[in-house]
Image (cartoon, coloured by chain):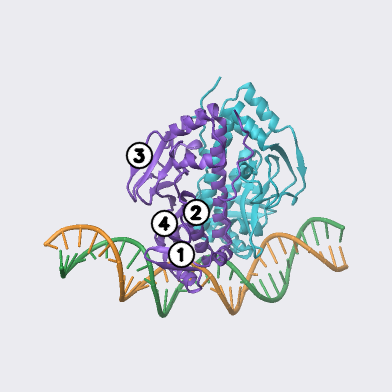
Chain colours: A cyan, B purple, C orange, D green
DNA sequence: CGTCCCGTTGAAATCGTTCAAGTGAGGTGG
DNA sequence: CCACCTCACTTGAACGATTTCAACGGGACG
């Protein structure tokens, strides 16, 4: 049984052949540890490796000329990072650790080999990337067309669901792991306004806060105010051919 | 020489083997024509095919509960559509023709076959998808963190650059092909405000308008006010192994 | 014990929206 | 060929959501 959370996620969805399990295990061979707040890759850095996040939480972001930051995504165990390496030689985004982390780097040539030798696995990776793409379109729609309250609510729900895919025991009460400023940079709001929105969600009984934790008190209502859809729950790789 | 614009785009970037050219040509075998404003696929429709856009222009969007619309991307000849089919059985977005179009549908099982038989081609498709992903993060950052003027300017530049990849003769003067309402739905603004921003860009001498066309009069300044980066120009697939 | 970071709160300012009205070009039927 | 209709675009004025500015509290950490 391969031990990376990435392997766990893949094998949750398709049955792997021994060859595929080997290939998957090789992705986890090298490991790199980084401290909280360490930068794995900066915008415009030379880019030739991809990574799988094995432990911890990360984020990717871009900085604008005026110093403003847009957080593009939060990254959880089992996610593949730095996929732009497949199309670009310089990173379009910065990758930073939000907690102490363990990542497994692998050269993009490994990806090329995987396409040739374990195509089904490559297809599965591409499919998971599509799920990430769809989650990003959800964020785009949220930022472009929903209220501040809805965006904050959606982010809370998304983080909870992502944390839960890594640990099924996580219920309605969890440690967010990010600051209000980071929530703002992810949702296109200011930290000040995020604070007001959290307070409002609390006053309306949708969430509780305390001890660095958030509790979803009325999830149904939260989902409704957020326009939220859990994209990770609906993933279906059943079309992948069951090769020998 | 394969005749789809998709084939042209791929072979611009890597040298194809005869097998790969065959596989590419097979993608273009079936064709479907749609009229302007026709819907190829609605949100939540059953999803088992992908498409390559051969001619014309399309967009993808989502509708929110309150009827608001967020346009996720504009689609140009050579782009692959409905890639969420690789991870989901129902479409997360609506695909609509902005002009009369020709699309080439192919089942996702064809994609699976391609992974196994022409892996390098599959890798190239995944790489181009990454470019699309990066363009989407640019839009996310624009909507989340830049002014209305910057967003409109960025959209004008992006559309011009995308049109140009299909027709190198296109210079600084081109037909936009979308309404101000659509610009608004793509940038997270109202049609009214888009109008004011266009006027402002015009008054400041950055663009000219007339006869349904836009002219970029001061491209350098426009790029600066938009924070724009041309992602399609920097694509590099050189890492793909040059197989026999 | 001081300092820094994060969170909190109020008041004023601003950017973008909403509402309302009007213009103009293109298409269609009489 | 004209009357009519629709759709996109245009413009002004009022409104409102979010930002900005400013100040303060509290906990963690050296």
Locate residue B230: give its quadrant: bottom right
- Give the quarter of the figure containing the N terminus of chain A: top right
Query: Label 3 neighbourhood size at 10 Å, few (<14), some (14-19), many (20+)?
Result: few
Alpha carbons under labels 2 and 3: distance apart: 29 Å
Query: Label 1 neighbourhood size at 10 Å, few (<14), some (14-19), many (20+)?
Result: many
Query: Label 4 near label 1: C-beta < 8 Å?
Result: no
In front here: B203 or B67? B203
Read off the residue under disc 1: B215
| Residue occupying the far top of the picture | A244
Read off the residue under disc 4: B66
Alpha carbons under labels 3 and 1: distance apart: 33 Å
Alpha carbons under labels 1 and 4: distance apart: 35 Å
Q: Position of residue B175 (x, y in %)?
A: 41, 59
Read off the residue under disc 2: A141
In front here: A190 or C24? C24
Q: Nearer the viewer, mark 1 or mark 2?
A: 1
- A57 above or below A16? below
Viewed as shown, does residue A129 lie left or right of C5?
left
In terms of secondary structure, where does tag 3 sit? strand
Do discs 3 and 1 belong to a common subunit? yes
Read off the residue under disc 3: B32
In terms of secondary structure, where does tag 2 sit? helix
């Amino acid at each position: 049984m391969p031990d990376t959370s990435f392997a766990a996620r893949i094998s949750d969805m398709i049955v792997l052949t021994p060859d595929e399990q080997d290939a998957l295990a090789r992705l986890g061979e090298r490991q790199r540890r980084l401290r909280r707040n360490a930068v794995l890759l900066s915008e415009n850095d030379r880019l030739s490796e991809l990574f799988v996040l094995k432990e911890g939480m990360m984020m990717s972001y871009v900085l604008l000329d005026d110093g403003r930051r847009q957080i593009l995504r939060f990254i959880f165990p089992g996610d593949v990072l730095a996929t732009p390496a497949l199309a670009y030689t310089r990173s379009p985004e910065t990758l930073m650790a939000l907690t102490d982390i363990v990542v497994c780097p692998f050269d993009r040539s490994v990806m090329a080999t995987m396409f040739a030798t374990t195509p089904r696995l490559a297809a599965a990776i591409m499919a998971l990337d599509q799920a990430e793409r769809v989650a990003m379109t959800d964020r785009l729609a949220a930022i472009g067309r929903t209220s501040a309250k809805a965006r904050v609510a959606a982010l809370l729900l998304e983080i909870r669901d992502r944390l839960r895919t890594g640990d099924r025991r996580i219920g309605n009460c969890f440690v967010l792991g990010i600051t209000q400023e980071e929530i703002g940079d992810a949702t296109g709001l200011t930290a000040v306004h995020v604070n007001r929105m959290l307070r409002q969600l609390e006053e309306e009984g949708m969430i509780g806060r305390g001890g660095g934790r958030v509790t979803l008190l009325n999830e149904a209502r939260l989902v409704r105010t957020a326009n939220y859809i859990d994209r990770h729950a609906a993933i279906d790789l059943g079309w992948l051919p069951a090769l020998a």
